[in-house]
Image: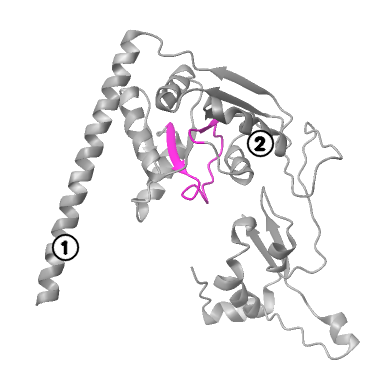
Amino acid sequence: MKLIIPVILLEIFQKLFRYLVVDEADRMSHTARIEWLNNLEAAANYNHNCVTIDDLYNASFLQKILLSATLSLDVEDLHEWRLRHPCLFKAVKEDVVVTNELSLNSVIIPNSLKIEYIVCDTKFKPLVTHERIEGRKSWKKILIFVNSKLASYRLAVLLKMLSVGKYQVEELSSNLFGNRRQKVLARFRKGTTRVLISSDVLSRGIDVMDIDVVINYDRPLNEKLFVHRVGRTARCGKKGRAIFLITAKEKKDFQATLQTVSFTGKVKERNFEGVKDAETGELYGQALTKLKETLQNTQKASIRKNGSFKKRWKKVTKS
């Protein structure tokens, strides 16, 4: 996305533009200068052609404030921002334990966050997710993270079937255009939608207060995503919970991740003991069968749509 600056704003920037505040700066480090930072600096009269010592003393500099939960201190990344005498500030609450062993690239996660991980087979993840949601009526806003568009769609379909209308489920899909995405977020903010499913990419820019729990249906791919996900809850000193669904093979790597991010709060381990009863097993089996049928119908509809488009395109090209 290019930043287009109207002429009238250029004049305002030249006179008044003093501070540049960039949120989620770590995600923009490699693209900001190419896409918009050069234009912005030029608009801010970022001219430092100093000839004398007085020119150097009187030169004005655009002050940049970079905000992020996982800001990298890599020299190459910071160089893109052209920082002048940079200072690092870390937000630390009183109940957070900070040790001397923390590296510069480490992050601080509040102790008001409780982490829980459930060890289960992949095939039972949807059922485990449903049972945790159904078992805690006090959770009013639940954000679920997945790693792919297909996983988001599959989980949304299954949870809607398993919940039988007991709670509202929606997903942030890349198929949502215009105001539809904002309407989904608005319903989640109001609490009309209790469960929202999203990928890491589509969740960027989501600002929803009072999220009770973040469920990691798929494990975060790296430590940065880990911090960004859990950072959606336990904000401003409030309590929050992050749940991770992992397989037995992933357990060791997950525990290593907790050490990497220097988490010192409570961690609870649960093990999925299997389907509770025959009725639950039958309901889950029916949901899986319906999901398979839904996916097949969706695929057929997509093929028909693409085939129809190809026929129309051939007519256009021939004419």
Q: Locate residue 105 relative to residue 139 in the image: left or right.
A: right
Q: Residue furthest bottom?
A: 51
Q: Is residue 37 above or below residue 187?
A: below
Q: Nearer the viewer, residue 294 or 236?
A: 294
- Which residues are the magenta region? 194-218
Instruction: Say which residue appears at 62% left-offset and 79% top-offset.
Output: 43
Amino acid type of the residue tagged 1 in the rendering: Lys
Crowd tier of the residue under label 1, counting other residues whose Cα lies within 10 Å: few below 14, some 14–19, many 20 or above = few
Q: Is residue 165 visible?
A: no
**Residue 39, image x, y percentages:** 59, 77
Q: Nearer the viewer, residue 140 or 147?
A: 147
**Residue 145, image x, y percentages:** 49, 38
Q: Is residue 257 above or below residue 117?
A: below
Instruction: Say which residue appears at 19% left-offset and 56% top-offset.
Output: 306
Q: Is residue 207 magenta?
A: yes
Instruction: Say which residue appears at 65% left-offset and 76% top-offset.
Output: 41
Q: Is residue 247 magenta?
A: no
**Residue to which mark 2 is pinned:** 257
User: Tag 2, which secondary structure?
Assistant: helix
Q: Nearer the viewer, residue 312 or 121?
A: 121
Q: What colour scheme has been applied to the protein in the rendered image?
A: one colour
**Residue 210, image x, y percentages:** 56, 34
Q: Locate residue 175 relative to residue 274 in the image: left or right.
A: left
Amino acid type of the residue tagged 2 in the rendering: Thr
Main SS of the magenta part reads: loop
Instruction: Say which residue appears at 79% left-offset and 52% top-offset.
Output: 89
Crowd tier of the residue under label 2, counting other residues whose Cα lies within 10 Å: few below 14, some 14–19, many 20 or above = some
**Residue 272, image x, y percentages:** 49, 17
**Residue to which mark 1 is pinned:** 310
Image quadrant containing the C terminus? bottom left
Q: Is residue 286 visible?
A: yes
